Image (cartoon, rainbow, N blue to C red):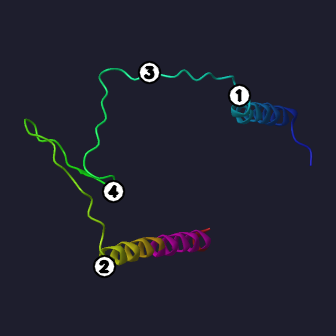
Amino acid sequence: MVYPAGIVRRAFVALVLLTGLAAAPLRSVGQTVTPINPTVEQRVEAVGPAQGQRVGGVVPGGEQAVGPVVPPTANEKAAETTGKVAVGFMAVVLSIAAMAAQIMFI
């Protein structure tokens, strides 16, 4: 099969441009890391034991409430896992349905 020269030339130019764009991330430029010294404005204080903390939102004019994290119960974990499985199952069903629809209507 013979293609017109204009189409071949355009395809070649497009291929060269796309190859150049794809290779751009591979050309790395030297980077330097500059350490930033902490300023006086930053302060970190430990609150309670290191097991975990819950931080609530600040009400305008109020103070922030900080408390320990309550781990989820077995029922909550089971419900979360069941929800994840249900969402995954629905994703599979919808993708198969979309594929079947495309095959039927093409």
- Choose the circle earlier in sequence order: 2 or 4: 4
Above or below — where is 87 with respect to 52? below
Residue 98 lies in the magenta stretch:
yes
**Residue type, numbered disc 1:** Ser
Q: Can you identify the residue that label 4 sits on?
A: 51
Mark-to-mark CA distance, 4 and 1: 42 Å
In the rendered structure, the answer to whether residue 23 lies left or right of residue 2 reads left
Question: As shown in the figure, which amino acid type bears the numbered disc 2?
Answer: Asn
Q: CA distance from mark 1 to mark 3?
A: 27 Å
- What secondary structure is the magenta-colored segment mainly? helix
> What residue sits right under mark 1 in the picture?
28
Nearest the camera: 88 or 35?
Answer: 35
Q: Nearer the viewer, residue 105 or 21?
A: 21
Neighbour tally class for label 1: few under 14, some 14-19, many 20 plus, Cα within 10 Å: few
| Extreme residue in the left direction | 61
Question: Which range is magenta?
Answer: 89-103
Comes first in the chain, label 1 or label 3: 1
- Is 57 drawn above or below residue 86 in the view shown? above
If you read the primary sequence from the N terminus, does the residue marked by circle 3 or circle 4 appear first? 3
Which image quadrant is residue 3 in? top right
**Where does label 2 land, which residue?**
75
Per the model, the C-alpha gap separating discs 2 and 4 is: 22 Å
Callout 4: SS: loop
Callout 3 amino acid: Asn
Relative vertical location of residue 52 with respect to residue 19 in this rendering, above or below: below
